[in-house]
Image (spheres, rainbow, N blue to C red):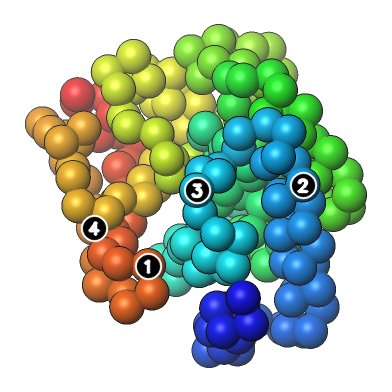
Amino acid sequence: MIYQKEIFEAYLKSREFPDIPHLMGVFDHYLKLLMAQNKIVNLVSRKMPAENYWLQHFLDSLLAMETLDFKGQTVLDFGTGGGLPGIPIKIVQEDCVMVLLDSIQKKCRAVQEMVEALKLSETSVMSARVEDYAFMARRPSFDVILCRAVALEERYIAPLRRLLKPSGSLLMYKSRSLDDLEGMSYETLLDREDEHIGRRRLIAVAQRELMRR
């Protein structure tokens, strides 16, 4: 565990994030919370050793910050599961508004407990299908929608378009397959083969492109 944790800490330093000891303390806390909740509710793969969370979940989540500036942005984590990638991004970038969305209520209860334990400000957890959430009254419009572990099914296209600001974009975490983006224009913001987490691509789809699907 120490080895992967050290790699993660070195990554934070390489990105020149402020107050690394504080951030590492918060991520330590998050790891313990996530492990405990995962024993009760299946939030992330239970086959993955806990030491792998540092790179496969936490570092992977933060890759989006290499491509976009989240400061002052309103962000939706669509299909958040265990709070990934939304919680790691929020930990590092406090100055953003984060909504963590999942359709499974018991997952949302677990994530809400973690958000409260981590004392994350301007972070809300919503239990709803994206198709329903898009039509809720008084919900925000988003600068960025994060999609890390959800394939872009046809039924999601119109709701995601509705949720985005005209200048907004959908940011998708991908490994190899881009089959769900067939017929859609997109921009590859990052394409990297990493020795620790394998191939990772970050794909941005502009709000206007979702209209053309």
Up-down relation of residue 106 to residue 76 (above or below): above
12 left or right of 159?
A: right
Q: Secondary structure at mark 3?
A: loop
Q: Amino acid at mark 2?
A: Ala
- Image position of 179 (left or right of 140): left
Please tell me whether mark 4 or mark 3 is closer to you in this view: 3
Residue 95 seen in render: no
**Marks 4 and 2, how far apart at CA:** 36 Å
Q: Earlier in the sequence, mark 1 or mark 4?
A: 4
Give, as a three-letter code, the residue at label 4: Thr
Of the numbered discs 2 and 1, the one sitting upstream in the chain is 2
Spot occupied by residue 96 in the image (x, y as percentages of width and height): 69, 54
Give whichever of 155, 8 is nearer the camera. 8
Residue for point 19% across, 25% down: 212
Residue drawn at point x = 47 percent, y = 62 percent: 56
Amino acid, disc 3: Lys
Quadrant holding the N terminus: bottom right
Q: CB of mark 3 within 8 Å of CB of mark 1?
A: no
Residue 36: assigned label: 2
| Amino acid beneath label 1 | Ile
State the image coordinates of residue 28 (x, y, percent, origin top left): 76, 68
User: Circle 3 is placed at which residue position?
Assistant: 47
Mark in front: 3 vs 2: 3
Residue for badge 1: 197
| Closer mark to the observer between disc 4 and disc 2 | 2
Label 1, residues with CA under 10 Å away: few <14, some 14-19, many ≥20: some
Q: What residue is drawn where x is 71% and y is 23%?
A: 106
Comes first in the chain, label 4 or label 2: 2
Q: Callout 4: helix, strand or loop?
A: strand
Residue at numbered disc 4: 188
Locate residue 51, reporting x and y percent.
59, 67
